[in-house]
Image (spheres, rainbow, N blue to C red):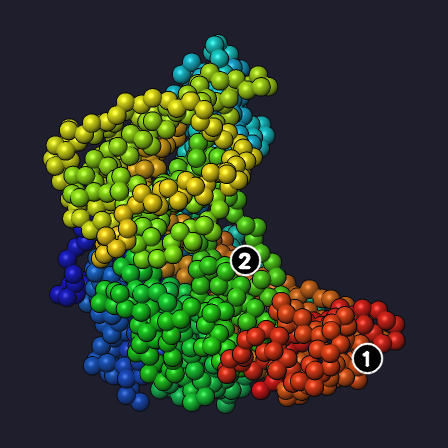
Amino acid sequence: MADESTSPPAPSAVVDEKLYSRQLYVMGHEAQRRMMSSRAVLIGMSGLGVEVAKNIILAGVSSVTLCDPESPNSFDLGGNFYLGENDLPPRGASSSSSSSSGGGGRGRAELCRDRLAGLNEYVKVDVASGVSSLLRDEAGLLALVAGATVVVVTVPLRTSTLCAIDERCRSSGACFVYALATGVFGKVFCDFGDAFVVTDRDGENPATSQVENVVTSNPALVKVLEDQGRHGLETGDRVTFSKVVGLDGLLSGDGGDAATYEVRVTGPFTFELPGVDASSCSEPATQGYITQVKTPVTVKFRSYREALTDHGELMMSDFAKFDRPPLLHLAYRALESYAESRGMELPMPGDAAACGEVWELARSMDSGKVLKNDDDAAVAADRRIVLHLASGSRSVLSPMCATLGGIVGQEVLKACSGKFTPINGFFYFDADECLPEAPLSSADVMPSGTSRYDSTVAVFGREAQMRLLDLNYFLVGAGAIGCEMLKNWALMGVACGEKGKIHITDMDRIEKSNLSRQFLFRNKDINEFKSDTAARAAMEMNSNMNIVSYQEKVGSDTEEIFGDDFYDKLSGVCTALDNVEARLYVDQRCLFYRLPMLESGTLGTKGNTQVVIPGVTENYGATRDPPEKSIPVCTLKNFPNQIQHTLQWARDYFEGEFKQSGEDVNSYLSNPNYAESLAGQQNSKVETALAIRKTLVDERPVSFEDCVVWARLKFETIFNNQIRQLLHNFPENQITSSGAKFWSGSKRCPKPLIFDLNDKCEDAKMRNHFDFIVAAANLRAHMFGIKGRTDEEYFVEVLQNVIVPDFSPIEGVKIASTEAEAKESDNAVASSAVVEEDVDQILASLPKPGALAGFKLNPIEFDKDVDEHMLFVTACSNLRALNYSIPTEDTHRSRAIAGRIIPAIATTTALVTGLICLELYKIIGTSRKELQIDAYKNGFVNLAIPFMTLSEPTPPAKTTAVVKGEEWHWTAWDCLDMNMGDITLEEFIEHFKGKYNLDVSMISHGVSILFSFFANKKKLAERMKMKMSEVVTSVTKKDLPPNQLFITFEIIANDLDTDEEVELPYVKFRFR
């Protein structure tokens, strides 16, 4: 049933971790392998169909069969980014006949196939060849179900055909998904059978905690360490224990054979183990690790036929519209009834008679009394929704396709992998806030039949489309969200008119790991700039798009590029960033220039959107998450108890050994006044000087063998000698002054490691001893420009001849056991009287830079995506974890923690950009309707559960000031605008007296005070005659950039009548 002549070979069973790097932190290896052995059939290749196809191909579903022999029409172009106006059939030809296609007689599936296949070389994409028509060939459609894991329908089909496909899927063990995007309304239906097994309901990391003690009781009572947080368990959960100290080995069983125990929660930090009798144990457990075990669940679904009449519980998306899902269920049934009576033809835009007929059908089918009839307003509200649904039913809008395409794409991945909880039954979604109160007239919305913008015009009218064409937007970031945003904008026509322009900037270049979700990029684009490549790809979708790309960071240091004159021409800003600091900076720019800001972000299957409207909503930075807690220094140095601690320590060690030491040596060799610059390092000058001598003299290698010996001795120093010294200071049986065991609670008693080249850890199954030597030796060699090697035989031979000195504990060494002692120790070093003398002696013992002319080290910057770097950090972390009996982690998991990797998947990205672009429709203005704050929506989604909630934004906080006897409520969006030219300081002060009845007592600009009542009278007199820009340059000693139009001033002023200080916003002074 499929044409496979141009399909790539079947994918290998091995997961490409470079390509799927970020996605693997969402799905996991096992789920990814299941997807790589699955087949999806997609029926319908209009806008929603191509979105779903794009998302699941990027995700790596093994085989995707496309079925859609129908010719494209102009409505399709609003959502299908792989179709263009040249693909439309000639005017007058039937849009349902594939033989008359303008794309060389090909249907939508064939037209899209090659470009979809180019998204992922591991996915086989073919076109069903045995289906002649979506509406007339039911037998052909049913035949596609054979061998499919999931069948997805994204175009209107007869109810009888949909029921038949669903029943065939049920009988063959395939999952069924039906979804439609019609104007600003959409629906999704899922039937995964009577017994679908979900292996992981939510995708959250298993809850973990540490044992404080396990009481010798029946049943055993477990208390966790409170400083590590609540245990996060529920009664009925199952857990495993590892590295347990005490309880006579009752809860032992580390590794893959660990027993699981049921939990009965007794408090946020305590739980019992029913059936576990610890009353006969000789001692309680005092330490150990607890890990939640996720158990599969079986979910039962209704068939499509059953759900049509008894839809059951409907998933909500907006609790302000709690009664909307049942209404849309009825409205869609009425629309489908209308279409089936007319050969599956939907109403034309603005056809009032047809829309009215759909409304009457809804009333006649309302056996469940969904429609309100208690008052005229309620009836009108329901009628409005049904009429708008009918009028825009042919419209295919890119933002709706992106939103639903993300949701449906994730449902397909659930069907293929068994991971995450599917939508059970129907889900309805709408953005009716974008719409005018009543449908527009047919004259306003009539399609041309040849334009990409027919779908937008059909819903919002021609005036709205013109406003989209003339937008000037700044897109900050060209990663996953940036790519999806550009795609949506190209189809919407944003900045595709003569007056419009998009500015896009991103400093980064394309890497292989980007390709699984940043869909505008291909293998050939690796190492190219993201912004340039994304701009070119968007223009291929819509050649009329006016777009300028930059490779600049957006911040205070690039305000000569993105300055007053730049922002002054913008309609708004859209952020596609991956860090809070940059968002906060852009937020401040939007506040200053009073520009709308479209903000979104993702974290695996979770996504959030925020629309920021000047004067209407609070700004992005008005509310912030609390900062992350830092790890205490003494914990990192001597008392780790989590793998996060050992990984941070390993990263710090990498930084010091392979980067900082090289940079210090290079500074010494290149800076003639190095001794003077070193004098400024109060706390670390001796340490730095010693490190230079060690790197440049004592331990300088001349061969790779020297690097191997160095690595072996480092192993002994770090993982044996230092631990033995720690135990010398704090013996295993040490008792504190209060009588408690020193090594208890979060302080885990370490053990020195004995080097064993063949050792493999239980948890991560890694050869950490060997990996450490190989990675450390090669990194050391790279620093010194020596060629490395990795063959095991060589290392075995060299290591046999390494002489490791015996360890002798050093008396008098002070080791900080608390954070306070660590700070005290640092202060003691800083105040040492012999520091200067020591540094001078050390520097005098070094070879003179002139004697090493041309010599330079290669400092190594840690990169989480470089396997050699991660091998060292993982091995180093795991060895330290083994020192402290902490469960180890493999390289994949270590990379996520050490590299602070943000999990990402294409489905969530598509969804959040769709939601944001729906807000853009509102920002440009809705015909014949004035929008209030409740029309705008912030969103939070979690596709794993699944969960979506849209909510009204928060209004900005207000400050009250009394000016001229009247209250003025101002917000962060407000300022005192002065557009009077570059007036003098005297005129500036007089302006406030005359306009606001205020006596200005102080004027400042940044940290500089320009005017104050207590300043030198002579200087004040001079400044009074100077222009404001001259005052600023005179005081700050800095020239104003030529592209700067505004200067901001903060003023302190009192009311002239009451002498009360008046709290005012800043002054925005335009001097050019």
Residue 516, image x, y percentages:
30, 59
Q: Secondary structure at mark 1?
A: loop
Q: Count residues near mark 2 (Cα–Cα under 10 Å), then give few for <14, some for 14-19, many for 20+.
A: some
Numbered badge on residue 997: 1
Q: Nearer the viewer, residue 834 or 411?
A: 834
The kind of residue on which mark 2 rests is Thr
Residue 734's label in the rendered image is none
> Distance from label 2 to label 1 (Cα)?
48 Å
Q: In screen coordinates, is 308 left or right of 550?
A: right
Q: Quadrant of residue 261?
A: top left
Check disc 1: other Cα within 10 Å, few if <14, some if 14-19, many if 20+: some
Kind of residue at disc 1:
Asn
Q: Nearer the viewer, residue 382 or 983?
A: 983
Mark in the foreground, 2 or 1: 1
Residue at 37% from the left image edge and 44% from the top image edge: 689
Task: Determine whether label 2 and label 1 are within 8 Å by CB.
Answer: no
Check the image and name the residue furthest to the right.
Answer: 1057
In the rendered image, is residue 375 in sight?
Answer: yes
- Rendered residue at 23%/64% (across/down): 523
Answer yes or no: is residue 355 visible. no
Q: Quadrant of the N terminus?
A: bottom left
How far from the left and from the top, in percent, is residue 739? 57, 16
Q: Residue at x 27, y 39 (%)?
A: 698
Q: Residue at x 80, y 77 (%)?
A: 998
Instruction: Look at the picture and state if 946 lies above or below 374.
Output: above
Q: Is residue 167 above or below residue 332?
A: above
Residue 625 is situated, as x and y percent measured from the top left of the image, at 56, 53
Relative height, residue 734 to residue 912 (above, below): above
Residue assigned mark 2 = 949
Please state if 992 lies on the left or on the right of 222 as rendered: right
- Decide: is 769 above or below 459: above
Query: Front-most of 847 and 598?
Result: 847
